[in-house]
Image (cartoon, rainbow, N blue to C red):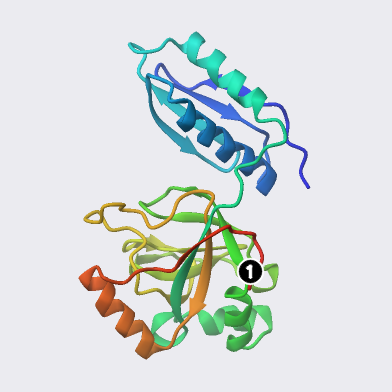
Amino acid sequence: MTKVPQARILTAGDSALTVEFGNEISEEINGKVLALDNAIQKEGIVGITETIPTYRSLLICYDPCAIRYAALKRRVSRLAERLGAASSGAGRIVEIPVCYGGEFGEDLPDVAAHAGLSEEEVVRIHSSKDYLIYMLGFLPGFAYLGGMDSRIATPRLKTPRVKIPAGSVAIGGEQTGIYPIASPGGWRLIGSTPVRPYDPDREDPILYRAGDRIRFVPVSAEEYRKIQALADQGTYPCTVREGGTGNGI
């Protein structure tokens, strides 16, 4: 377990400050970041316009006409001190159906060969854990996930692809993730999900939030297409469970 350093508050331009909790990627540090974010939301501090959690820090944007930097720093500092041993608590588990391999994940054979495993074993390992969402970024709905099994870690492509289809599930080094929209990318494609992690026309455009966990659920090509038809109509309800633990089923 990582010992979390005392919070450090720094200026970030003329209308934002950042609160740092160390310089490591760990669930304990990220838990503090999310706990502070939750505490700020509950406090309802007038003048804060947006908060953005990252792996180890929280960016707090504010309106200088509504609250001064010194006053905001004092209030945030007090909230950070009150966190004590608290963490963000268990988030939700969002189940993401994935069809692995073949036309849905053309790099699965390469990942299996690199790992010295069968494709079936790679799929079993990849879908056997709950992945903590440390933060969102890079693209709308792109989740930075932690906890991938190092046995299936695979280097990025030497030459990134110009366009990766939306919904692609991929591995890059020791990380895994979902490309929520079509974009360039160099991660290895092992599967695809028919659901839409990001939909600007949805009431809640992003399917999950930092602090949730993602569980990849293997589905057949036939199931994929059925779910895709429902997702296209906006009628596919992803399974969401309360109380992520970090352990697989």
Visible residue check, residue 243 = yes
SS category of the residue bearing label 1: loop
Task: Give above or below for 159 relative to 16.
Answer: below
The image quadrant of residue 172 is bottom right
Residue 208 in the image: state x and y as whole percent.
43, 55
Q: Can you say which quadrant of the picture contains the C terminus? A: bottom right
Q: Which residue is mark 1?
A: 153
| Residue 241 appears left or right of 166 | right
Tag 1: residue type? Answer: Ala
Placement of 75 over or under 104, stated as above or below: above
Which residue is drawn at the image coordinates 69% and 73% (left, top)? Answer: 151
Percent x, y of residue 100 = 47, 82
Quick one: 61 or 236, which is closer to the camera?
A: 236
Residue drawn at (50%, 29%), measured in percent from left and top? 40
> In the image, 5: left or right of 191?
right
For label 1, count other residues whose C-alpha is less than 10 Å away and answer few (under 14), some (14-19) or many (20+).
some
- Identity of the residue drawn at 43% across and 20% down: 13
User: Residue 198, relative to residue 75: is it above or below?
Assistant: below
Which residue is located at x 62 percent, y 62 percent? Answer: 174
- Where is residue 194 shown, x and y percent of the image? 35, 74
Quarter of the image for residue 62 reads top left
Eyeballing the image, is 13 above or below 146? above
